[in-house]
Image (cartoon, grey):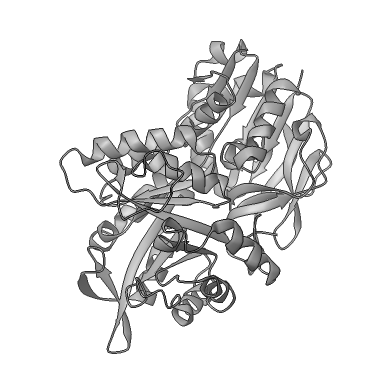
Amino acid sequence: MLTKRIIPCLDIKNGRTVKGINFLELRDAGDPVELAKIYAENYADELVFLDISATEERRKTLAKLVENIAKHINIPFTVGGGISSVEDVALLLKSGADKVSINSAAVKRPELISEVAKRFGSQCVVVAIDAKQINGQWKVHLVGGKQPTEIDLFKWAKEVQELGAGEILFTSMDHDGTKAGFANDTLSKLSDALHIPIIASGGAGNIQHFEDTFKIGKADAALAASVFHFKEIEIPDLKSELKSKGISIRI
Amino acid sequence: MKIAIIDYGAGNVKSIEFALQRLGYESVLTSDSEQIKTADRVIFPGVGEASSAMKMLESTGLDKVIPELKTPVLGICLGMQLMCKYCVEGDTQGLSIFDAEVIKFDTQLKVPQVGWNTIFDLKSNLFKGIENHSYMYLVHSYYVPEHQHSIATSEYDLNYCVALNRDNFYGVQFHPEKSGKVGERVLKNFLVNCRQ
């Protein structure tokens, strides 16, 4: 039986991990490869690396990092952040990334999704959607959730599926950082409306939240950052607990 | 041991090269038929869409080379699918190494299937030392129905064939290079335990 996926997300700036990381066993707490190796050994199902650097050198630095990750990690990983052209995608895949995550650039130019899907296959196209409720309506936001648009979440999710996205990474800006649980009602509606997998993001605070997002939110995968980085939740504990609750999980 | 990874422009070949390096083996990425014919082991990867991948194979003449190989060949994901007779995706005639058809999942479950699933009914040296119901990483919308040459089965709404073997030809739908330590064991078995 296909299992639900647990995905730690690492923020990267200039080739280094950001956010405080509470891994005493790391020789170099800022080295994304060391941290990724630990997650892979601890049964993370996939990893996401989100590049937030804004330097001119960023493409080259990121490609080098991606190659280094691919050399050392034996599970799939996705790279996102600032991807705006087919050339950006080509460089990252060539460096060894399994998937890329496209966000704002897809909203600005939706054809980018079909161009990438056509050239490299849908399996490597994750479309990240950040959204937040405005007057009870879910609206897509850009630039890490800072810039609102008029675009309806559900309409956009359907459109990216039609354009060839292989998966959707949905982050609720209303839940992100709250540690109060995922946006399960919305996730469940998305899951019913679409046939491609949905990755839930934003709101993870405890193990119950993961159980809820798989059972109530019907999510195919759940992504989180700080609860893993600060060891508030250890992935092996999380997974055995979920398994004992009858959720299909790889241990 | 000379290992050739067929590089015909279809997908992420780097990660296979890196996985072999982690096992202590060097390999060459190549589309040169001489290099492929003289290799001790050949890996035939592939991701993306079937008909365009097949066209790329034809344009390099590799569609004639691969079925004639006498050395062990391992097709991965789309590579395995193209080794079959026919793929529904893009109405594609394959290499006919396996007498099998590749059809689309018809299910209420999510398509593509993305993630870790178990494999069972394991046969052949390719799975030596690997426990039944081990987890492998898969990403696919098309599949081979249960088959006489099946050496591993998986389940996604129905049981289907997730690995094939005939003579020196092996094919796996999952990605051994991305399936943790168990996946690396499959690659190691292919190099060490699968002979002509």
Indicate left or right for A140 with A179 as reference: left
Residue at image position (58%, 46%) is B91
- Residue A55 in which image quadrant: top left
Q: From this view, report whether residue A4 is shown above or below residue B46.
A: below
The image position of residue B11, as x and y in percent, is 47, 37
State the image coordinates of residue A39 (x, y, percent, origin top left): 50, 48
Q: Residue at x 79, y 46 (%)?
A: B132
Give the mark count. 0
In the image: residue A73, left or right of residue B96: left
Q: Residue A153 location, x and y as percent? A: 35, 75
In terms of image quadrants, where is residue B73?
Answer: top right
Residue found 71% across the figure and 52% down from its top? B118
The front one of A95 and A48 is A48
Whole-percent x and y of residue A61?
26, 36
Residue B65 shows in this picture: yes
Q: In this view, does A240 lie to the left or right of A126?
A: right
Q: From what the image shows, is residue A16 above or below residue B83?
A: below
Could you tell me which quadrant the C terminus of chain B lies in?
Answer: top right
Front one among A123 and B62: A123
> On the rendered structure, is B144 left or right of A75?
right
Q: Is residue A115 above or below residue A227?
A: above
Residue found at x 39% / y 76%: A154
User: Foreground residue, B142 or A107?
Assistant: A107
Question: In front here: B51 or B42?
Answer: B42
In the picture, residue B186 is in which quadrant?
A: top right
- Give the residue furthest to the bottom: A135
In which quadrant will I find the N terminus of chain B? Answer: top right
Residue A95 appears anywhere in the view: no
Q: Residue furthest left?
A: A56
